Amino acid sequence: MSNDFDTIIVGGGLVGAALACGIAAKSWPVFARGLRETTGIDIGLQQNGGYDFCLTADEWDARSEEMRLVRRHTRGEFEYEMLDNADLRARIPQVSPEVLGASYSRHDGHVNPLLLLHALHRRMQALGCRYYPNRRVAAISHEPGVFSVSAGGDRLRAARVVLSAGLDNQRLAHELGMHVPVAPLRGQLLITERVENFLPCATLQLRQTREGSLQIGDSHEDVGLDESTTLEVITRLAARAVRIFPQLSGLRLQRAWAALRVMTPDGIPIYHASEQCPGAFAVSCHSGVTLAPLHAGAVADWISGDQPHPLIAEFSAQRFDISNT
Amino acid sequence: MFKQLSDNKAEMLTIELDAESVTVPAGISVAAAMLYLDAAATRQTPVSGSPRAAFCMMGVCFECLMEIDGSPNRRACQVVVTAGMRVRRQLGARDNGQAS
Amino acid sequence: MKADYPLLVIGAGPAGMAAAQTAAEYGVEVAVIDQQAQPGGQIYRNVDSSLLNDPSILGKDYTFGKPLVQAFRRAGLDYHAATSVWYLDKNRRLGILKQGENYQLSARKIVIATGAQERPMPVPGWQLPGVMTAGAGQILLKSAALVPRDGVVLAGNGPLMLLVAWQYLQAGVRLRALLDTTPRGTLFKALRHLPKALGASDYLWRGLRLMASIRHAGVPAYKAVSDLRAIGDGCLQAVSFNAAGKSQRIETELLLLHQGIFPALHITQAAGCDIRWNEAQQCWRPALDAWGESSRAGIFVAGDGAGIVGARAASLDGQLAGLQLAHQLGRITAVERDRLAQPIRKAADRHRSIRPFLDACYPVADALLAPPDDTLVCRCEEIDAADVRAVVRLGCVGPNQAKAFLRCGMGPCQGRFCGSTVEQIFAHERGVSVSDVGRFSVRPPLQPITLGQLAGIQDLTED
């Protein structure tokens, strides 16, 4: 049976109410509402669960196993269902009879990543952050208590420096005595023309943005820094989408594109504080969209508080040090 | 908005525009036919619903999107009229992929 | 279609026809793919299949194309009309759509001869039905024998606008007004290019004759027009503008806009060819060698798609590319190629010598490159100039991030009608050259394709 709430607080006094505020503020809906109220940008949050379709028995088995593992790791907090074709089509009638089934999790959702980035930029500048675009950081040096960042002719000094430079994090972290192993993993994605409401919720293979376009993807290809699309992959993505939803066959492709994910060796984020240069931090992950509220919350608290955080410590890059294992 | 030059050799044919029979010169594009019919607007945008009509006539601007013979979002300037063709103006986004 | 072509020419306008015929003449196996149903490109559109009884009202520069198109048809090349290239990558892999069927193939050599498009002329209200481009008006005349029913206002500048005005007069159309947006003092600045232009004085005489006959017809003409607006509720009802310090308003149901043309670069960029900013023509052009070969070996660009040269020079450039391809594919020696190329190059240079003068005569007013805040920039996603300026001020790193923040350029036209304006707004706001701003990246599909067509792709290379 699915839960009614994530957390129940007993007691509505100062303590309970303060806790309720703090805990609720960490959720996606509150994060999204905050951005809308402060920047005027609606990032298109839909949090009504998500499906991952399985076309073959192998896919079904692998998915079931994966879901079981996640549930175990979260001590049962993660909820999911495995739906066969009949159950699935009872909920999404457009799905082809050819689809074996799907996993469903109510935790899944969707935001528009482009609008999220736009909103975050507006917010950070409204909060007084200075933004220096188009500057490649050439060097970072450290003396006790101060970092100097050389970028595009400027030399900027600060007591703390946070590296969130995507694939460039490895190079920059090295300058500050950190080992942050990241590698590119290409993903290709199809975007269709706008259609009237088609999908009620997100699926791993396909989602509909608020504007009406469908996003179909994504692929995982280890091809170095090559950001190009390939005929083979976009053909495969289209074929899979049409197998799941045959009525999409007449829909036009608007855009196919490829991008490089920032992958850590185990696929789990790196939140690392430098021991050699106190005040230097590295943040690397491939899921900047999903984790945005966490980054704006707990990770930011950890960095600005200079406090070791027991949970975040588990995400240190030290886990990749050979001497540690 | 546009008329035929009198000195032309086009024959006429009948198409269906929003379920109404209309007569247009043969051999011209659907977008040209819309202008000939004084029915310039081919659609309302899915973003704000503002009316749009053919603009570049050469397949670049995608303003003249229409539903032609059941297939939505086709560039009317790139399709030549044929007898009996069913042409519809589009209001907002197309339906969810029921098209042929 | 075949799995692999030694030479594939994309586009059957003057440059594409010439490149294909020249290469074929020396024994190269050529295939030609063209989006249009008839060869000739935009310039010679329907020249041998016109609905007009008397196509000569369109002028001699148009009818000049008739023997060229007929010769192309007679050459018996592997020619695919009404066929579009929806995919091309740097490895010369192609996705081709013909009669709804999707083919995947490759080519050893490719000539991109996809010509030009009109430069967007964003003015407030340009999205209203009743506002079109001058080129659109000309296409309606060439391909449908249609002319404005109740008069027309032409606004902008450039040779094509004057030509359309002249053609409309020939066809008996009422020109309500000719609004010339060329900034004041332009002709004086252009004069220094005149000596070189005298080498192609036939162009000058034709231009002067054109202007004289428009003047003679008594068309109300306004110079140095600014603050142009298209006004109407649901469709165009009037235009307003400023000329000689006075606000004017003209009632009209049709306004045709034009401010020059620039190379259509979508296919060229998709192929990964380097492009450079050209300040004189205010456009991006591919970087090419003397034969038209791009930075990607084996990929040539010929004609207006390489930089605006006009139909005659385009045809000659196509011939030069054809010779070099015949040489690269082992059909003629370098000595032969050079001997054959010499007179062609000389003629091409002569036709080209008019360009600096023409470019200088028809500069685009700054306010039409980077329009006022209330002007729609991206017609598809309905993004106005104020929105674009706001993200520039936010520190947007370039047009591609503006695309992400605003969806500007993400609609069906894929930035073809807003890209140049977005670049110019960035350049103006930052006080830098467009070359420092960069350009929208190009994403497939280059032409519309459905998911079903894509999924059912016929991979001929795997046969």
Image (tube, rainbow, N blue to C red):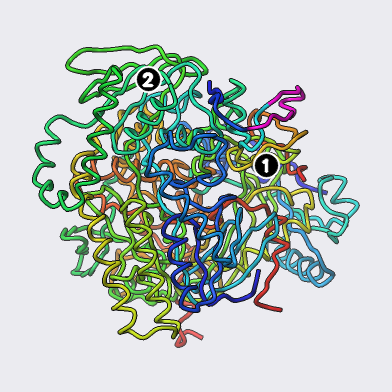
Give the left or right position of residue C18, taking residue A190 as reference.
left
> In the image shown, does A5 or B30 lie closer to the viewer?
B30
**In the image, residue B12 lies in the stretch drawn in magenta:** yes
Q: Residue at x 50, y 60 (%)?
A: C71
Q: Chain of mark 2?
A: C
- Quarter of image, res A5: top right
Residue A266 is situated, as x and y percent measured from the top left of the image, at 56, 74
Judged by its main secondary structure, the magenta piece is strand
Residue A216 is situated, as x and y percent measured from the top left of the image, at 64, 55
Q: Is residue A136 above or below residue C336?
A: above
Q: Is residue A77 visible?
A: no
Q: Secondary structure at mark 2?
A: strand
> In the image shown, does A14 or C53 lie closer to the viewer?
C53
Same-chain check, marks 1 and 2: no
- Kind of residue at disc 2: Leu
Q: Residue at x 49, y 40 (%)?
A: B61
The magenta segment: B10-23
* Circle 1 residue: A8
Give the left or right position of residue C218, taking residue A321 as reference.
left
* Circle 2 residue: C175
Q: Is residue A204 visible?
A: yes
Residue C227 is situated, as x and y percent measured from the top left of the image, at 27, 22
Residue A279 is situated, as x and y percent measured from the top left of the image, at 30, 63
Q: Secondary structure at mark 1?
A: loop
- Kind of residue at disc 1: Ile
Q: Is residue B68 above or below residue C194?
A: above
